[in-house]
Every structure is written in C-alpha cells, then in structure tokens.
Image (cartoon, helix red, strand yellow):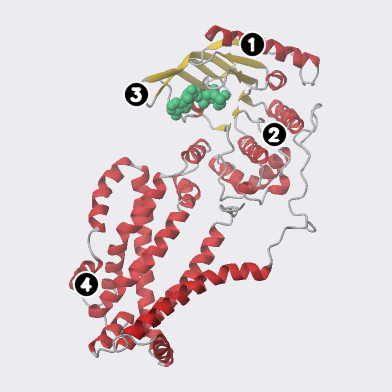
C-alpha cells in the first residue's frame, strides 16, 4: 500500500476475509415452506371474503348476486373489447392524480418538517383540507374545469394531498438528527441532503402513504367519472346502476379491485423490496 | 504556528427542569500546525461538545475559535474531517458511496474518487466491503468506515472522537500506527478524544487534560517521546503519567 510506504512503523490492518466466499454453507429455509408462508395468508384472506359474500348471498339472494355469477360476469366483461379501454382510463386518472399529489406533498412535507414557518403556515391548511370530502372536490373540479381530464386529476390530487402530507411531515419530524449533522459537517449540498439523507428516511412513510393514497384516489376517480367523464370504470358502474344491474356494478368494481391488487403485489411490493435492500430482515417473534 | 486557537470556550446546556448546566468552563488551548493533540478527560465532561463546537454543530456561549490557513492568516471555519463518536453512516448507501458523498461535499474532483475510496478503505482494512451496506458490517467495521471517510477528504484539520474504541486491541494498534503515519506524512492537524491513555501517549504530540464537568483545561502536556513512535515501556510510562494527571483532576472534583 502506497500511503504508508517510506515510514517505518507501519503495519496496515489485515484485509479481512473476502466478503463473498462462494462455498460458504448458508443456513437455508426450505423453498416450499417459504412459498407457502408467503401465499397462504393472503389466499386465506381472499377466501374468507368470498365465504362471507356467499353467506350473504344465501340470505339476500334477490339483492346480492352469487360470487360465481359475478365472477362469470367479470370474465364476460374482459371479453368485451371496451373493458381495457375503460380500465386504462380510470387507472391513468388514479396514477396521474396520485403522482401530482405525491410530488407536492414530498416538497411541502419536507418544508413543514424542516422550517418552522413552513409548519405554522401549512398546518392549518392541511387540517382544513383533511375535512373536505372527495365528493366536494369532484363537484368543484367538474364545475371549474368542465368535462375533461383536468377535473379528475385535480379532484384526486386535492383530496389525497392533505393525507399524504401528514404522513410525510410525520416522517420528516422523526428524522435522525445525527445523520443530518453528519451531512452538514461533510458539506452535503441542500439537494444532496434532500436526496441522500432526508428522502431515504421517508421511504416507509412514502409507501404507507402510497398504499392508502392509491385506494383513496380510486374512490375519488369513480365519483368524478360518474358525472364528469364519458368513460372509465366509474362511468360504467353508473350506467349499470341506471339499469339496476347489481351484477354488473359488482363485476366492474371487482375487476378494478383485482387490478389494484395486482399493482400492489406486482409493482409496489417489488419497488419496496428493492428500496429497502439495505435493511437486514428482522424477526421480532423469533424464539 | 497554531492551526486552531480555542480561547475561553464556554458552553451551557439547558436541562429538562429549565435550569442550565455549564459544560465548558473557559477552556483554552491550541492545535499546532501538523501536530496530533489528544483530548482526555472524564466521561461526560464535555469532550464531544467541544468537538461539535469546533466543527460548527454547536454554538459556543462564550469565547472564540480562531482558525488559521497555511499562511497563518485568520480564516473562517475550514473543511474538517470528523470521526463521530458513533459511525454515522447512511445505512441506505453502500460503504463506497458513503465515502464518495463526503468526497463530493469536499469538492474532490470526480476522477480522484475511486483512488481515494480504495486508498482509505484499504487503510481501514475494509477494501472487500466497498459494495456492502453498513448494516451488514460489524460495529467496529462501521467505525472504521467512519474513519476512512473522515481521512479520505484530506482536510487540513481532522477531529476524531474515540476513533478506535470499538475495535480489538491489535486492530486498534495497527490503525493507530497507520493513521499516525498518514497524518505525519500529509502534515495534518489532528485533535482526537480517547479514554485509552496508552493510545494518547502513543499517538499524540500534545495532550490536553480536561477536568470533570464543567470542563476546564487542567493541563496542556507536550509529549516528548521520539518519533516515529514505537510501542514500548516509554509509551506506558507516559500513559501512567497521564493517568496521574487525570486522577488528580478527579480528586479535585471530589
Ligand atoms: N444536546 C444536549 N443537551 C443537553 N445536554 C447535553 C447535550 N449534549 C451533551 N449534554 C451534556 O453535556 C455533558 C457533556 O457531554 P459530552 O457528550 O460532551 O461528554 P463527553 O466528554 O464526550 O463524554 P464521553 O466521554 O462519555 O463521550 C453531559 O453531561 C451531557 O449530559
Ligand atoms: Mg463523547
């Protein structure tokens, strides 16, 4: 090593064993058992809902269609060529509205958590915003912007913004002050502080807010679509309602719920796992 | 010439009950250019507080810090490499990236980053772990990454708060040797806190002995052991001498 050559009394620290010894025997959990542990609980959850639904259907058979009939209706919907169009319209409104709200709430949440004047200014507004129902924003949005894409985006963003901000603001307030101090000593720029020190600490809050926010966004989108657009899942649900087709109402809802579950498991879980790879797994109940 | 003069440093902390507690009581000493100074004193006396004040994380309630540049001109607070009392790594950044971020903050040209990262991780004995996440390292390994980060920015002034406290004695000894040799070679001015008096004796050119809280400078001792240092009876003898000075400050409180 070049640093110390030329001085007498040096002995460098022995480099430690390679960090990736290939033939190291690792303790392994059986593959089938780990799959079972992952799949069984959510499967059981879905099963119990279907079971309750089926019982209710037995009691109110003229009102509530059976799970099997509804599933058949949902499959029928899929074969209808316009299904994916309407689904795509709704999903786009959910995600664009959500993305707008998230961008603003990360900025405002960090501002509120780090600047006292920011907290004093936004806190009353956020509390106020939390009390305004999504339906109200939907009406206002359609009246303001008319029947076009701006209305659902606005209604979604306005409704979920306060709830996202609250999550992120709470995360900023719980931040590790020692790491902020470290970044000040090593002269991180403000943007480095936000990107490398603050935002990573907000990842759990951002994911909690995402899961809750997407659900809320969908509820708002359906409402806007019922009277403010000519397409989308909400529009279809409304049409089914007008001819009092309960089976279709539930079938549309069901397909959308399935789409959201796929997104949750396929996309959000995956991103979350990748973003938290730095954190060793903990097992609280291990004995 | 003094790199840093600490004069009449005073610090109070407000306690929960609203009363204030004096932590630094007119502490004065200087860090001479290119020298290594050890800061010793009883636990809780205010050593970390003093280091935090020097890097600018705490504001002094009285007294002055005068930093000087190479020409002896007074200057504002320069870039300082700081080994915190804990590792303080970003757990979501790999070991190498933790160091690269500090290099970026220090405006080190990007072309030099890889050389620096490897040179200083090598020095800490951790080159295998450059792509590992900090939470997968042992406590002592993390502390060594903190050491590598503070040295890698190659600042003129380096502060270290118990830098070798969480590693075994043999590794600590090698780290002391390498960092002392490096600081001599690069002509750094170093202030380090330690509870290990042999370490203070081995590493230092000067020793500041603090009293118990509130910390006053009890003694400023010049270390006359010959350089380059060797482990041996002289080191232990000087350590024993320091121990005497420390315990007399303890008695002064009692
Ligand atoms: N932010 C703070 N607010 C209030 N009191 C503090 C704060 N930081 C430190 N103190 C108090 O100041 C005193 C000195 O703390 P400091 O961390 O400087 O001690 P130290 O000499 O580094 O001790 P050790 O050797 O155990 O690390 C302690 O009594 C501590 O309780
Ligand atoms: Mg301390």
Identify the residue position indicated by label 2 in the image: B167
Tag 2, which chain? B
The CA distance from mark 2 to mark 4 is 65 Å
Query: Which residue is drawn at the image coordinates 69% and 10% (left, top)?
Result: B241
Residue A230: percent from the left, percent from the top? 27, 84
Q: What subunit carries mark 3?
A: B
Earlier sequence position, callout 2 versus callout 1 = 2
**What label does residue A145 carry, if any?**
4
Write the residue at 50% across / 42% down. Answer: A188
Query: Disc 2 to disc 1, how far (Cα)?
Result: 27 Å
What secondary structure is found at the residue carrying circle 2? loop
In the rendered image, residue A156, in percent from the top left (x then y), is placed at 30, 67
Q: Are marks 2 and 4 in contact (CB under 8 Å)?
A: no
**In 3D space, how far apart are the residues under numbered discs 4 and 1 (Cα atoms)?**
78 Å
Where does the N terminus of chain A fall, quadrant-wise? top right
Q: Secondary structure at mark 4?
A: helix
Q: Mark 1 sits on what residue?
A: B221
Does residue B142 appear to the left or right of A4 in the view shown?
A: left
Q: How many marks?
A: 4
Which residue shows up at 76% across the image and 44% down it? A16
Q: Position of residue B11 (x, y in %)?
A: 43, 20
- Looking at this view, is A72 or B230 the one in front? A72
Mark 3 and mark 2 lie on one chain; the one further toward the N terminus is: 3
Residue B117, visible in the rendered structure: yes
Mark 3 and mark 1 residues within 8 Å of each other at the beta carbon? no
- Left or right: residue B66 versus residue A126 is right
Which is closer to the viewer, label 3 or label 4? Answer: 3
The image shows residue B246, relative to residue A196, as above or below, that is above
Of A56 and A29, which appears nearest the observer? A56
Tell me the number on the disc at residue B18: 3
Near mark 2 (Cα within 10 A), the count class, few <14, some 14-19 or many ≥20, is some
The alpha-carbon separation of the residues under discs 3 and 2 comes to 39 Å
């Amino acid at each position: 090593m070049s640093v110390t050559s030329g001085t007498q009394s040096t002995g460098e620290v022995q480099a430690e064993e390679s960090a990736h010894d290939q033939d190291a025997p690792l303790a392994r959990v059986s593959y089938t058992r780990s799959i079972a542990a992952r799949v069984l609980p959510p499967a059981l959850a879905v099963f119990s809902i279907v079971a309750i639904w089926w019982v209710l259907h037995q009691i109110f058979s003229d009102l509530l269609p059976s799970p099997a009939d509804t599933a058949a209706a949902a499959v029928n919907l899929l074969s209808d060529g316009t299904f994916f169009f309407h689904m795509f319209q709704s999903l786009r409104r959910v995600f664009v509205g959500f993305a707008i709200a998230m961008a603003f709430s990360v900025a405002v949440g960090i501002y509120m958590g780090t600047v006292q004047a920011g907290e004093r200014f936004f806190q009353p507004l956020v509390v106020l915003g939390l009390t305004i129902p999504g339906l109200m924003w939907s009406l206002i949005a359609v009246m303001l912007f008319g029947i076009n894409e701006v209305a659902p985006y606005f209604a979604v963003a306005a409704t979920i913004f306060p709830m996202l901000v609250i999550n992120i603001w709470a995360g900023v307030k719980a931040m590790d002050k020692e790491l902020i101090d470290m970044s000040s000593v090593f002269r991180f720029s403000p943007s480095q502080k936000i990107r490398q020190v603050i935002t990573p600490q907000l990842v759990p809050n951002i994911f909690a807010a995402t899961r809750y926010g997407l659900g809320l966004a969908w509820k708002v989108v359906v409402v806007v679509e019922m009277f403010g657009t000519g397409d989308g899942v909400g529009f279809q649900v409304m049409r089914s309602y007008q001819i009092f087709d309960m089976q279709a109402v539930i079938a549309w809802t069901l397909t959308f719920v399935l789409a959201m579950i796929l997104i949750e498991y396929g996309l959000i879980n995956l991103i979350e796992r990748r973003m938290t790879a730095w954190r060793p797994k903990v097992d609280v109940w291990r004995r | 010439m003094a790199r840093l003069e600490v004069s009449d440093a005073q610090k109070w902390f407000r306690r929960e009950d609203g009363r204030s507690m004096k932590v630094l009581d007119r502490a004065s000493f200087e860090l001479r250019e290119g020298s290594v100074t050890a800061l010793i004193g009883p636990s809780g006396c205010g050593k970390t507080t003093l280091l935090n004040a020097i890097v600018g994380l705490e504001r002094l309630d009285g007294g002055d810090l005068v930093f000087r540049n190479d020409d002896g001109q007074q200057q504002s607070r320069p870039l300082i490499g700081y080994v915190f009392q804990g590792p303080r790594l970003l757990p979501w950044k790999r070991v190498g990236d933790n160091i690269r971020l500090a290099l970026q903050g220090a405006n080190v040209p990007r072309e030099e980053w890889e050389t620096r990262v490897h040179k200083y991780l090598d020095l800490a004995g951790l080159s295998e772990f450059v792509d590992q996440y900090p939470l997968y390292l042992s406590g002592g390994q993390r502390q060594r990454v903190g050491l590598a980060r503070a040295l890698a920015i190659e600042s003129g002034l380096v502060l270290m708060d118990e830098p070798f406290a969480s590693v075994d004695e043999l590794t600590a000894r090698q780290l002391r040797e390498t960092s002392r040799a490096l600081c001599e070679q690069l002509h750094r001015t170093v202030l380090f806190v330690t509870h290990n008096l042999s370490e203070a004796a081995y590493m230092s050119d000067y020793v500041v002995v603090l009293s118990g809280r509130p910390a006053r400078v009890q003694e400023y001792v010049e270390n006359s052991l010959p350089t380059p240092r060797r482990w041996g009876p002289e080191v232990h003898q000087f350590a024993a001498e320091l121990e005497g000075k420390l315990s007399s400050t303890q008695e002064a409180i009692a």
